[in-house]
Image (spheres, grey):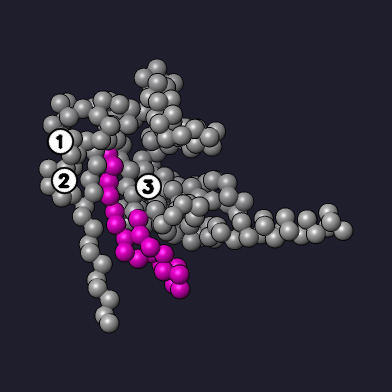
Amino acid sequence: MRFYVSLIALTATVASFAQNYPSEDWQIATAVLAAPEYERENSTVLGFKSDGTLAVLRKGTNDLICLADDPARKGFSVACYHDSLEPFMARGRELKADGKKADEIFQIREAEAKSGALKMPKKALLNVMTGQVNEETKEIENTHLRWVFYIPFETAETTGLPLTPAAPGGPWIMNPGTHRAHVMITPPKNKAPKKKE
């Protein structure tokens, strides 16, 4: 009897956990919002199965990979990146799954990139879109798009880029001189309209 009750509880827990993951169609439709419109239809999409595992939800035909929102993380965030960044991204996911912290992941990938064990592109673009999910319509609102242009091992001196934005939304270089060196371009967010009383 006790085993039977425990089995019911376990089944309910698994079902509840599975329900936290949106449908694959919704994940695909929202993941590609971070991509240029002309590339959305043919991009590869990585998303979450009902058991929480990350998998290819749709195999694309262009050079773009889009990553669906992770419902286990607060807020809505999707990204699309050039497929030459996939070894870097995949290695990060693997190390995170192994329980490594952010600083450990950085150090491991840095060493592997320098040794050639981790293949890094000479340059590649990643787009990140954040926003809010309308719980009634399930549409994404208050979206904000920023760009991350990877230029491994480049510096402020080799590019002329500042280490901080020279003006709101201006480009600057982050993690200069490392495998994660990248240009950040973050347009200012529009202020949300005040609610009428």
Q: CA distance from mark 2 to mark 3?
A: 21 Å
The residue singled out by tag 1 in the image is 162
Is disc 3 placed on a helix, strand or loop?
Answer: strand
Q: Which mark is residue 80?
A: 3
Specify the principal SS of the magenta part.
strand
Amino acid, disc 1:
Pro
Q: Is residue 66 above or below residue 142?
A: above
Q: Which residues are magenta?
A: 130-149
Amino acid, disc 3:
Cys
Q: Tell me if label 2 and label 3 are in contact, CB under 8 Å.
A: no
Q: Which mark is residue 170?
A: 2
- In the image, 196 versus 148, the foreground residue is 196
Q: Is residue 166 left or right of residue 13?
A: left
Q: Is residue 66 left or right of residue 47?
A: left
Q: CA distance from mark 3 to mark 1?
A: 25 Å
User: Which quadrant: the N terminus?
Assistant: bottom right
Q: Is residue 152 above or below residue 77?
A: above
Q: Position of residue 163 (x, y in %)?
A: 18, 35
Amino acid, disc 2:
Gly
Q: Quadrant of residue 177?
A: top left
Say whether residue 148 is magenta: yes
Q: Is residue 40 visible?
A: no
Q: Tell me if label 1 and label 2 are in contact, CB under 8 Å.
A: yes
Mark closer to the observer (3, 1): 1
- In the image, 15 versus 196, the foreground residue is 196
**Image point (26%, 80%), residue name:** 196
Is disc 2 placed on a helix, strand or loop?
Answer: loop
Q: CA distance from mark 1 to mark 2?
A: 9 Å
